[in-house]
Amino acid sequence: MADKKGGVKKSNKVMVYSTSWCPWCKKVKEFLKENKIKLTNRDVEKSKKYADEMIKKSRQKGIPVTIINGKVIVGFEEDKMRRELKIKSKKGMFGFFGR
């Protein structure tokens, strides 16, 4: 959600289920860091409790799983994360130019 000034809402609740070796997990965390979004990281390889929790919430075993304000996103889905966090896309006209 956007705040009154049109910026990113600071109180987004973001949880990332990941491992230390997963490249897509790293991309999710880098994207969140670049956009100054605080997150709670849960390493599913180090904790069976976190792995079971991730499977229960996402109904699958693949990583990364990102939960933003209750919305489950599987994999690195930048557009979905931007939409849930109300972050404008960096793409240019018609999404063809820029990142």
Image: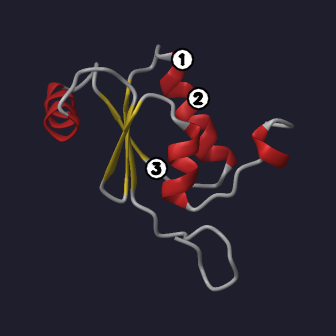
Residue 23 numbered mark, or none: 1
Tag 3: amino acid: Leu
Q: Position of residue 33 (x, y in %)?
A: 62, 45
The residues bearing labels 3 and 2 have C-alpha atoms spaced at a distance of 13 Å
Return the residue at label 2. Answer: 27
- For badge 2, the amino acid type reads Lys
Q: Is residue 36 above or below residue 5?
A: above
**Which SS class for mark 3?**
loop
Residue lying furthest bottom in this view? 4
- Indicate left or right for 1 with 17 as reference: right
**Along the line of sight, the residue nearer the viewer: 10 or 60:** 60
Residue 31 location in percent, x, y?
62, 40
Q: Mark 3 — residue?
A: 39
Which residue is most to the front? 94
Q: Where does residue 88 sit, x and y in percent of width and height?
A: 69, 57
Location of residue 78 in the rendering, given as x and y in whole percent from the top left corner: 58, 39
Q: Is residue 5 above or below residue 78?
A: below
Residue at (53, 58) in percent of width and height? 85
Question: Marks 2/1: CA distance?
Answer: 6 Å
Contact, mark 2 vs mark 1 (Cβ under 8 Å)? yes
